[in-house]
Amino acid sequence: MRIRTLTLTTASGAALLATALLPASASGTPQPMPPLEEPVSAAGLLAKVTSCAQLSNGKYRTDESTAATIPVCGKHGAAFWKADMDIDCDGQRTDSCNEDTDPWFQPDTSFHQSDGRPLRSDTLPYVVVPGISDTWDYLKAGIKGGSVAAVIHDDQILYAVVGDTGPKGIIGEASYAAAEALGIDPDPATGGTGSGVTYILFRNSQVTPIESHDAAVTLGERLAKEFIQAN
């Protein structure tokens, strides 16, 4: 499956803004094509999440052994947090994700494909939300299985879906495929990264079918632009 990330570079931005020419008009004069719209940049999104209006009633740990320091924050149209990335390798058994490769492997995900099967974590980029608790209820925040997320790491944006739920007190987790697409070690036993990941989840959004990464990218790009404009 094709996995798309968007990297912020000056050259690519200039290329997108280059003016092309359409075929000549009836008068024989070439007609200029309007510049292509510049894609959302990682810097543009990060500039909108520098402050936190806290949505959660408390804070989350990034691991069992760490202190609870991570709040879920809110802006118009999205919930977000800044944390680490642990690797979720649950769902369908594959060569990359199974009981031998992942000490915590579970053969199911909280949300399923359109055919009823669990998600495939080594090919589908998805994020994990904490299980519903008194700290935060993702459903009440307008987030559900298949909602679109923008995951940002090292000036790259990856559009993904909400695909699984995790422990009620821990935050900062995404699928094997999400980590791999962002250049993070996807090994479920030893991989991940300890910090530097921003998760922006767009409220009241839905990718159908949930397993379509292309659909997540298309919707994610539109919602990211709307989020920047609204905030």
Image (tube, rainbow, N blue to C red):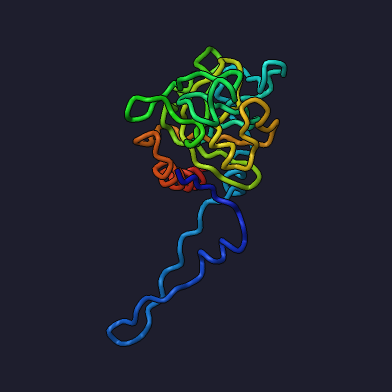
Whether residue 77 is visible: no
Q: Residue 26: where, in percent of width, then height?
A: 27, 84
What residue lies at 53% left-to-right and 24% top-to-bottom? 98
What residue lies at 56% left-to-right and 42% top-to-bottom? 181
Of residues 158 and 143, the one drawn nearer to the viewer in this rendering: 158
- The mark total stands at 0
Q: Residue 141: where, in percent of width, then height?
A: 46, 25
Q: Is residue 31 above or below residue 61?
A: below
Q: Is residue 176 above or below residue 109?
A: below
- Residue 77 placement, left or right of 179: left
- Residue 180 placement, left or right of 110: right
Whether residue 192 is visible: yes
Q: Is residue 165 above or below residue 146?
A: above
Residue closest to the far bottom: 28
Residue closest to the far top: 134
Q: Residue 99: where, in percent of width, then height?
A: 55, 20
What residue lies at 72% left-to-right and 16% top-to-bottom? 65
Residue closest to the far left: 26
Q: Residue 153: where, in percent of width, then height?
A: 63, 41
Q: Quadrant of residue 187?
A: top right
In the picture, the quarter occupied by the N terminus is: top left
Of residues 54 and 112, the one drawn nearer to the viewer in this rendering: 112
